[in-house]
Image: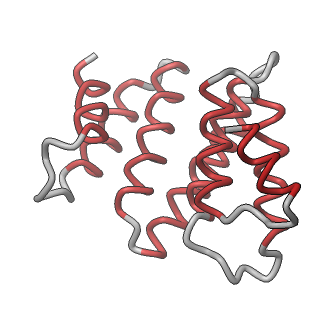
Amino acid sequence: MREGARVYRASGMKLGSAHLAHLGAALVTAQHADEALAVLTEARAWSPGGEERAYRAEFARIEGEALLGRATPDEKGAGACFEEAIALARAQGARVFELWAVTSLARLWRRQGRTASACDRLARTIEWFTEGLDLADLHAARSLLGG
C-alpha cells in the first residue's frame, strides 16, 4: 500500500479520503502508529474546508487507534478521538462508521476495566442493525460483548 501511494503521489495525484483511510488503518494494523498519524494529517490537509466529509469519522477513529498503538499509548487522547468519531458518524447517519467507533471505544473501556459501560454502549449500538446481521463487523462487536 505504501508503494502504491508513493507511485500515485509521484504522478502528481493526491490520494482521496477512502485511500488515505485504508492506508492509515493498514499502518495501525502493521504497528506503524506514527506513520498512520502522518497519513491522517495529510488526509485532513487534503480537504481543509471539509469538502470531503464522508471519512471524517473514520479518520478520527483511526487516529484513536494510532494513539493506542504508539510506544506510549495515549488512552485519554484515543478516547476523545473515538467520542469525536461517534459524534461525527451519528451526525452523518453513518451507522457502520459509528459501529466501528463504538467498538473501538468499547475495547478501550474494557482495557481500562470499564467492562459494564463498554458492553452497555456497544449493545445499544448493535441493536440499531436489523439487516446484515451476519456482517463481520457485527460479529466482532458481539464477540466483544461476550468476552
* Colour approach in the figure: secondary structure
Quadrant that contains the N terminus: top right
Q: Is residue 110 above or below residue 81?
A: above
Foreground of the two, 120 or 2:
2
Across and down, in percent, residue 116 comes to: 34, 28
Across and down, in percent, residue 35 comes to: 82, 35
Foreground of the two, 14 or 140:
14
Q: Is residue 110 above or below residue 136?
A: above
Across and down, in percent, residue 76 comes to: 71, 35
Report whether 133 appears left or right of 95.
left
Quadrant that contains the C terminus: top left
Across and down, in percent, residue 84 comes to: 61, 58
Report whether 62 appears left or right of 47.
left
Report whether 116 appears left or right of 52.
left
Q: Residue at x 66, y 48 (%)?
A: 81
Q: Residue at x 39, y 35 (%)?
A: 117
Q: Image quarter for residue 2?
A: top right
Foreground of the two, 24 or 97:
24
Q: Image quarter for residue 37?
A: top right
Q: Residue at x 69, y 44 (%)?
A: 63
Q: Residue at x 37, y 50 (%)?
A: 99
Number of marks present in the image shown: 0
